[in-house]
Amino acid sequence: MATNEGTNESWRKLLVPGAASLVGAGVGLALTRTDKLRDSLPSLGDVGIGDLAEDLKNKLSSSVGSASNAGRGSSSRSRRTLDAGELDEHRRRRADRRKQRAGR
C-alpha cells in the first residue's frame, strides 16, 4: 500500500504543474489570437501608462539632482596634497598596523 501512495504522490507532483502550464498556455494563446478578446481588454494608451512612467522619471531625476547638489555644497572638503616625507610616514604607519593585525 505504501508504494501505491508514493506512486500517486509522484503522479500528482507531475500532473498538477503540467495541467496548470497547459491551462496558462491555452489562455495566453486565446488572448493573443482572438480579436474579440483583445478588443475587449483596455489598451495601455487608454490607461495612461506612458504618461505615468514619464512623470515618475521626471520626479526621480529632479529629486536625484537636488539631492546630489545639496550634498556637494554641505559635505565638500578640501584635500591637501602630501609631500614625499608625509607619504612615506603614512605608508610606514599603515604597514606597522598591518603587521600588528597579522600578529607578527
Image (cartoon, rainbow, N blue to C red):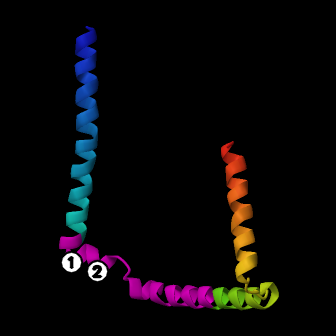
Q: Which mark is residue 85?
A: none
- Residue pictured at 68% horizontal, 54% vertical: 98
Q: In this orientation, which residue lies closer to the viewer: 90 or 40?
A: 90
Q: Which mark is residue 35?
A: 1
Direction front: furthest residue: 85
Distance CA(mark 2)–CA(mark 1): 6 Å
Q: Residues within 10 Å of mark 2 (few under 14, many from 20)?
A: few
Q: Main secondary structure of the magenta part?
A: helix
Q: Position of residue 38 (x, y in %)?
A: 27, 76
Residue 91 vs 96, above or below: the answer is: below
Residue 36 vs 3, above or below: the answer is: below
- Residue pictured at 46% horizontal, 84% vertical: 49
Residue 89 vs 78, above or below: the answer is: above
Q: Position of residue 87 (x, y in %)?
A: 71, 76
Q: Residues within 10 Å of mark 1 (few under 14, many from 20)?
A: few
- Does 75 lie within the magenta span? no
Q: In this orientation, which residue lies closer to the viewer: 93 or 31?
A: 93
SS at badge 1:
helix
Q: Is residue 92 left or right of residue 61?
A: right
Q: Which residue is mark 2?
A: 39
Quarter of the image where one finds residue 7: top left
Residue 29 vs 70, above or below: the answer is: above
- Residue pictured at 74% horizontal, 89% vertical: 72
Q: In this orientation, which residue lies closer to the viewer: 5 or 55?
A: 55
